[in-house]
Image: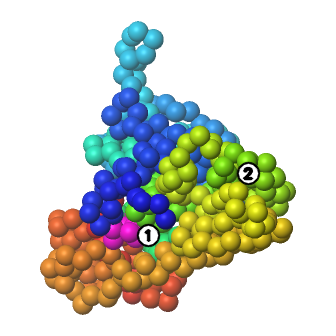
Amino acid sequence: MAKSVLTPQAEDFPRWYQELIQKAELAENGPVRGTMTIRPWGYAIWEIIQRELDDRIRATGHKNAYFPLFIPMSFLEREADHVEGFSPELAVVTHGGGSELGEPVAVRPTSETVIGDAMSRWIQSHRDLPLLLNQWANVVRWELRPRLFLRTSEFLWQEGHTAHASWDEAQEETLRMHEVYADLMESVLAIRPVLGRKTDTERFAGAEATYTLEALMRDGKALQMGTSHNLGQNFARAFDIGYSTESGDRELCWMTSWGVSTRVVGALIMVHGDDSGLRLPPSLAPAQVVVLAVRETTADACTQLADSLRGLGVRVETDLDTHTGFGRRVTDWEIKGVPVRVEIGPRDLEDGVVTCVRRDSGTKERIGLDGASGAIAALLPDIQRSMLEDAASRQTEMTRDVTGIEEILASEASGFCRLTWADLGAEGERRLNADGWSVRCLAGADGEVPATPAAVESSVAYVARAY
């Protein structure tokens, strides 16, 4: 690989992260502290994630809608736990049109309340259920310690909101979407997170239960990649979201919400990136292959190969800028993380071959120009599998069983520490929080997500320092 122009991860991981985002042209800080401008390469990655997830959401019967950015403060105040949980992060508008507003409005931190208000009108009968909605939007949570993609005052996401006739149906929906997220992370982002349930301390404000997906970054810190919440009847009660049963009785609905944000782009960077830059799994790479002309005389061959690859459904970029130094161009594409780089020089054409370089492993091979497009396309699923296996193996290596809380507190090691919830408990969780550790999730010893009080009591706690 080309010589790295980034600070090595082992030397300064946060600096490496910031440099990679800048040099890979993913994003930059916005003009207001805590905001983020997403550049075309970074936004193209988000668009693929969005498209892949939207297809999965639609396949489960949900419909997309859009709700207002501004929410009356009185809406938030109807659900006490909800407003208390978000009050430190709220951005509140008090003036508009040159005068003071009669009622302050919050810039949405999430949309349970404004969607709940709409649901109270849209749902009247059992025939209106289930109501399955999804929204692609921006939200605002005023961050005191912002970091691009991971924590920004404004970020992009999707938020699903559903209403059901029973707790069982709401719980089934909550866990179904949890699994949808798991499939997205594994099959598209090549990340296999731990699936579990949040403790009562960590659950979403106003929810009955929160289910999460937690993954380890290369520096051993954990990152929450998505959540799914069973809201019970809390918001239905606050907003009078009810329905008439077949017998004519009126019942409150059972509700859920769930979301994934641009934070997963940060996870992608920190799970797969190396000292040479980003490494993109082919499933979400804006360009799966880049074809570089070493000399101007090979430009036509590059264009023909690129066209052949596109005919096979491969996303391709051609780099015909032979006036820029070849080494500089290689470095730029490595930083951007394109899975396969194909180089065609005059000697390659004479020999009837192309030089093919895998970004995930750095391996280089010369393959025959005839049939090259098929051979290159065949590399992509292998790279996808290899990157998933690499990330999963690294996470396993950074996960260790411990005997008790003292072992965690005395440890300087990073990664997941795993112990039974019975041995930790709420008091142990408070002690860990005071020292900068948190219980990322509770997972069943059998791999099942704990969904009942009994399952929670017998669960395993995954503890880590986190972003």
Residue at image point 66% right, 49% down: 295
Q: Which amino acid does label 2 sit on?
A: Thr
Q: Which residue is at the front of the view, 244 or 319? A: 319
Q: Residue 298 carries which label?
A: 2
**Label 2 Cα neighbours within 10 Å, binned few <14 / some 14-19 / many ≥20:** many
Q: Can residue 90 be seen in this view?
A: no
For disc 1, the marked residue is 215
Vertical side of 137 occupied by 305: above or below = below
Quarter of the picture containing the C terminus is bottom left
Residue type at mark 1: give it.
Ala
Can you say whether 10 is above or below 146 in the image? below
Magenta residues, start to end: 215-224
Estimate the x, y position of residue 25 in percent, counting from the top left.
Answer: 49, 44
Query: Along the horizontal axis of the image, is 460 left or right of 88?
Result: right
- Above or below, 25 relative to 371: above
Does residue 218 show up magenta in the picture?
yes
- Please identify, in this view, whether the residue under mark 1 or under mark 2 is nearer the observer: 2
- N-terminal of the pair, mark 1 or mark 2, is 1
The residue most toward the top is 98
Q: Which of 287 and 438 is in front in this view?
A: 287
Q: From the top left corner, tell me how far across and down residue 210 is, in percent.
A: 45, 65
State the image coordinates of residue 164 (x, y, percent, origin top left).
Answer: 64, 59
Q: Which colour scheme is used?
A: rainbow
Q: Is mark 1 on a helix, strand or loop?
A: strand
Secondary structure of residue under mark 2: helix
